[in-house]
Amino acid sequence: MGTTFDLTSLFRSSIGFDRMLNALETASRVEPINSWPPYDIAKMGEDDYRITMAVAGFSQDDLTVTQEQNMLIVSGQKDGVDDERYLHRGIPGQAFQRRFELADHVKVVDASLVNGLLTIDLRRELPEEMKPRRIEIGTGKVLPKVEPKAVETAKQAA
């Protein structure tokens, strides 16, 4: 039994938080659990991340890594017909598609396949105008002192 949260009141009363609210809404949806292919997500540095997927039996030509805006899509599809007759098949070879929601300004830097492990390196690259910057405090000219004005109040006769 899943719990569904109604976020419509937050959409009505907040401005500029659309992406965060959409991410919360997406995370609250119940999706079937698909544990294949297994993967790890590691934080390699302050702004560097790595996704490692176990894709045994897939070649580089069978795999596709695509970034569409803030979504990373990894899919695998084996070409050809498997004519072998298996007594036991423990290495899955079915097609898959795994989606990862990326934060703003996260880009794929590299992808490689070594020994059945697909490694995707990601980096958050903030635009220069979004990075904190130090403002120098200068010694400007002395401004004239502002004299307070006296406020006169008119008394009304009753």
Image (tube, rainbow, N blue to C red):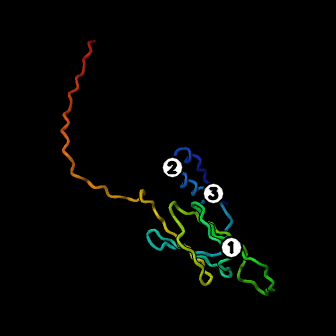
In which quadrant of the rendered view does residue 59 lie? bottom right
Find residue 43 and report its horizontal and vertical position in percent. 49, 72
Residue position marked by numbered label 2 in the rendering: 16
Is 152 or 147 nearer to us in this picture? 147
In three-dimensional space, the C-alpha distance between marks 1 and 2, rounded to whole angstroms, equals 36 Å
Label 1, secondary structure: give it: strand
Residue found at x 38% / y 59%: 132
Picture disc at residue 76: 1
Find residue 62 and report its horizontal and vertical position in percent. 69, 76
In three-dimensional space, the C-alpha distance between marks 1 and 3, rounded to whole angstroms, equals 32 Å
Between disc 1 and disc 3, whose residue precedes?
A: 3
Label 3, secondary structure: give it: loop
Does residue 12 lie above or below 130 as drawn? above
Between disc 1 and disc 2, whose residue precedes?
A: 2
In three-dimensional space, the C-alpha distance between marks 2 and 3, rounded to whole angstroms, equals 26 Å
Residue found at x 60% / y 76%: 53
In which quadrant of the rendered view does residue 75 lie? bottom right
Task: Name the side, left or right, on which 125 lies relative to 51.
Answer: left
